[in-house]
Amino acid sequence: MKTTSPPNEKTSRSNGLEPEYRFDYTKGKPNRFANRVHPGSLAVLLDPDVAKVFQNAESVNTVLRALLSTMPARRTRKTR
């Protein structure tokens, strides 16, 4: 039977993170998509069959605005 050495005990780290989870923020890059998001925007996930028809946000917005113009106006409820 082989004798094995006892497993190395992990040293206690000051922040509790293992070395593989350390991130060097000096190598980080800014989010290249951040300037595309406008205040008040809402992200919506389209199903694949719908996404084939609408290639960009402008086409989706055009169709939705056309649909909105055909819908009856919402009535507000009156409080008693």
Image: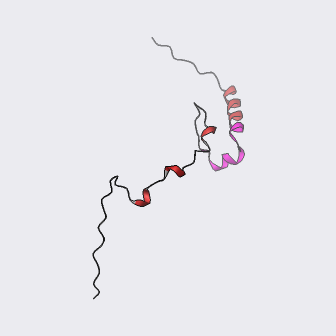
Picture quadrant where residue 34 is located = top right
Picture quadrant where residue 60 is located = top right
Seen in the picture, residue 18 relative to 80 is either above or below; the reply is: below
Q: Position of residue 1 (x, y in %)?
A: 27, 88
> Which residue is painted at 59% across and 21% down in the image?
74
Seen in the picture, residue 80 relative to 59 is either above or below; the reply is: above
Which residue appears farthest toward the top when viewing the image?
Answer: 80
Seen in the picture, residue 11 relative to 35 is either above or below; the reply is: below
Q: Position of residue 26 (x, y in %)?
A: 52, 50
Which residue appears farthest toward the bottom when viewing the image?
Answer: 1
- Count of numbered tags: 0
Q: Which residues are magenta?
A: 42-60
Q: Position of residue 76 (x, y in %)?
A: 54, 17
Q: Is residue 48 magenta?
A: yes
**Residue 48 located left or right of residue 25:** right
- The quadrant of the picture occupied by the C terminus is top left
**Residue 78 located left or right of residue 52:** left
Task: Choose between 56 and 71: the one closer to the eye.
Answer: 56
> Which residue is painted at 66% across and 28% down in the image?
68
Q: Position of residue 39 (x, y in %)?
A: 58, 31
**Residue 80 located left or right of residue 62:** left
Task: Choose between 19 and 44: the one closer to the eye.
Answer: 19
> Which residue is painted at 58% across and 35% down in the image?
42
Q: Is residue 11 magenta?
A: no
Task: Choose between 21 and 41: the one closer to the eye.
Answer: 21
> Which residue is painted at 62% across and 47% down in the image?
47
